[in-house]
Image (cartoon, rainbow, N blue to C red):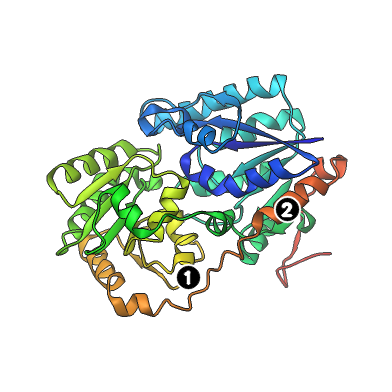
Amino acid sequence: MREIAVVTVARSDFGIYLPLLRAVRAHPDLCLRILVSGMHLSPEFGLTVQEIEKAGFEVFERIESLVSSDTPAAVAKSIGLGIQGFAQVFSRYRPDILVLLGDRFDMLPAGLAILPFHVPVAHIHGGEATEGSIDEAIRHCLTKLSHLHFASTDYYARRVIQLGEEPWRVTVSGALGLDAIREAKLENPTDVAERFGFSLESPMALITFHSVTLEHEQTERHFSALLDALDLPGLQCLFTYPNADTSGREIIQQIDRFCARRKSSKAVVSAGPQGYLSLLNTVSVMVGNSSSGIIEAASFKLPVVNIGRRQRGRVHAENVLDCGEDTREIKAALTRALDSAFRAGLAKLSNPYGDGHAAERIVERLASVPLDDTLLFKRFHELDETTNAARS
């Protein structure tokens, strides 16, 4: 039986992984191993490893890595601790394939630590762009460390090939987040409103904002401008806590202060995978700079105000309104997003990230790809400079 080890480091990737984890576990020729690290193991960020266990999955290994600080030095130290921790795991356990997702700094250590052990790596969501964060470099680094690639769109698949990866290694799977939506048992809006403490009689904004790590010194100013823009009559606000990025704790402090003085605003450390999707299905608008606003929100035809540079470069549907970081721009975009005519215009919106069957394509490839030298020994794939087309 082929052992597939999946690394999860945060509530965000676990929610995306869920359909894949179920599919791997259900496959007769595959054995699932879950390696947990990063924010999952931090009480400050909700100790979300418990959500993995509540979902019925066994945690195979726990790798402590997160330093209790959000300075650049702390992030670098966390990467180092993660490499040491994963190295210890791989010295006693080697899966047949290691699966990584996305671009988090706490995902990178697993890819680096496995390199000397000659274990094939499969990477999900390569080829994408987030020009405002260090995630951009980490994502492309993970692409070069990996042997199989599962891209969410044709455009991103071409990007992976442009990075020198051989086309046969790349599968256009679509985004797993759409599988999660298709499989989710969403709560009805009345129950969602009661659970999170807001009214369906007034507009509700779901706010998920993360530090723009390439300009983290501006975090306080950026988030203060967002908070000022939320001063609209009758607007209710529900904040989710940010990731453990540089200056992320500054955002948490501002959220707590804002909610303490504004009765119509609340915050949750983690809504959980099903709870978060149920919120996307219920609220009036999403505000911030999260990838969920780019990828998943379109499936709910939910208006999204995407702020600043963090997600710049990503493909998105017409429900996303891009704006700058100043209060006036954010308020103008938010006002437009809340306009009933704008929401009505999204009725026929199509999500560019696939059909909700990514897990099937990924599992089929993980189960069938030969685990031989052809997979492990990578060749740099050259592009024809005159046509920019891949050579056969």
Q: Residue at x 27, y 75 (%)?
A: 339
Residue 342 is drawn in which quadrant?
bottom left
Q: Residue at x 39, y 80 (%)?
A: 345
- Residue type at mark 2? Glu
Q: Secondary structure at mark 2?
A: loop
Q: Residue at x 51, y 35 (%)?
A: 54
* Numbered label attached to residue 317: 1
Q: Residue at x 73, y 53 (%)?
A: 165
Q: Nearer the viewer, residue 141 or 343?
A: 343
Tell me residue 124's x, y (percent).
63, 49
Tell me residue 318's x, y (percent).
44, 73
Tell me residue 222's x, y (percent).
26, 51
In the rendered view, tell whether residue 229 sits above or below residue 113.
Answer: below
Kindly tell me whether residue 189 is visible in this rendering.
yes
Q: Nearer the viewer, residue 282 or 138?
A: 282
Tell me residue 205's x, y (percent).
29, 59
Kindly tell me whether residue 307 is visible in this rendering.
no
* Residue beneath disc 2: 165
Question: Nearer the viewer's eye, disc 1 or disc 2?
Answer: 1
Instruction: Find out whether the residues at labels 1 and 2 contact each other: C-beta distance under 8 Å.
Output: no
